[in-house]
Image (spheres, rainbow, N blue to C red):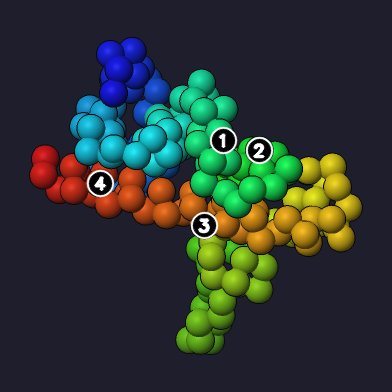
């Protein structure tokens, strides 16, 4: 990790403690910089900086890192850009308000809109529109888009495990 990267991470104004549910503890710039020291892969490190430290300056580098992980396809860079946008900036489900379920008459009912994921569901036609292609063309690249989102989820899981270890040590 470079000196500039370390200094950028240590800026306490850049950490969003709401991005990681920590059971009452706040995520500090120190926690994040300490955790990044344990993450050797550039993809997860960039994701942590973009998603949790809100460092917009690393977004393009994150997109390029993700694109390198995807199968060869002419739309690969655009799919990586859309996957980062969808994964990191999507909102909570408006129907259940990010809970994923509700109880009625003592019975648990899973949200019909997000299917319990708590996240706003994004339809394939909306993704196709964001890429500027028709839905039939999107079906051709949907598998690559799913791989991109899955890769981001894997990286996020790694970051979460490292952050959890860092927070439990303190």
State which tag comes first along the sequence, 3 or 4: 3
Judge whether residue 115 can be spotted in this image: yes
The image shows residue 65 at horizontal and vertical percentages of 50, 36
Tell me whether circle 3 and circle 4 mark residues in contact (CB < 8 Å). no
Q: Is residue 45 left or right of residue 133?
A: left
Which residue is under mark 3?
A: 150
State which tag comes first along the sequence, 1 or 4: 1
Q: Residue at x 52, y 46 (%)?
A: 69
Question: Observer-nearest residue: 123 or 17?
Answer: 123
Vertical side of 146 occupied by 32: above or below: above
State which tag comes first along the sequence, 4 or 2: 2
Mark 4 residue element:
helix
Vertical side of 82 occupied by 141: above or below: below
Vertical side of 166 occupied by 143: above or below: below
Q: State the CA–CA distance, disc 1 to disc 3.
A: 14 Å
Q: Residue at x 88, y 52 (%)?
A: 134
The image shows residue 166 at horizontal and vertical percentages of 18, 42
Nearest-to-viewer mark from 4 and 2: 2
Quadrant containing the C terminus in the rendered view: top left
Q: State the CA–CA distance, disc 3 to disc 4.
A: 19 Å
State which tag comes first along the sequence, 3 or 2: 2
Which residue is under mark 1?
A: 63
Q: Residue at x 33, y 50 (%)?
A: 158
Mark 2 residue element:
helix
Tell me whether circle 3 and circle 2 mark residues in contact (CB < 8 Å). no
Q: State the CA–CA distance, disc 1 to disc 2.
A: 7 Å
Q: Residues within 10 Å of mark 4 (few under 14, many from 20)?
A: some
Mark 3 residue element:
helix
Q: State the CA–CA distance, disc 4 to disc 2.
A: 28 Å
Which residue is under mark 4?
A: 162
Which residue is under mark 2?
A: 77
């Amino acid at each position: 990790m470079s000196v500039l990267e370390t200094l950028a991470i240590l800026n306490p104004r850049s950490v969003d403690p709401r991005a990681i549910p920590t059971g009452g503890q706040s995520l500090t710039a120190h926690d994040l910089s300490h955790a990044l020291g344990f993450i050797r892969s550039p993809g997860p490190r960039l994701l942590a900086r973009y998603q949790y430290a809100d460092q917009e300056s690393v977004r393009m580098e994150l997109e390029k890192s993700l694109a390198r992980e995807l199968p060869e396809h002419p739309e690969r860079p655009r799919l990586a850009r859309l996957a980062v946008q969808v994964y990191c900036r999507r909102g909570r489900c408006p129907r259940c308000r990010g809970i994923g379920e509700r109880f009625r008459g003592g019975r648990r009912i899973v949200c019909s809109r997000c299917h319990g994921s708590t996240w706003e569901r994004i339809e394939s036609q909306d993704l196709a529109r964001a890429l500027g292609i028709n839905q039939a063309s999107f079906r051709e690249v949907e598998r690559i888009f799913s791989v991109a989102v899955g890769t981001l989820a894997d990286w996020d899981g790694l970051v979460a495990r490292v952050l959890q270890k860092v927070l439990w040590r303190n």
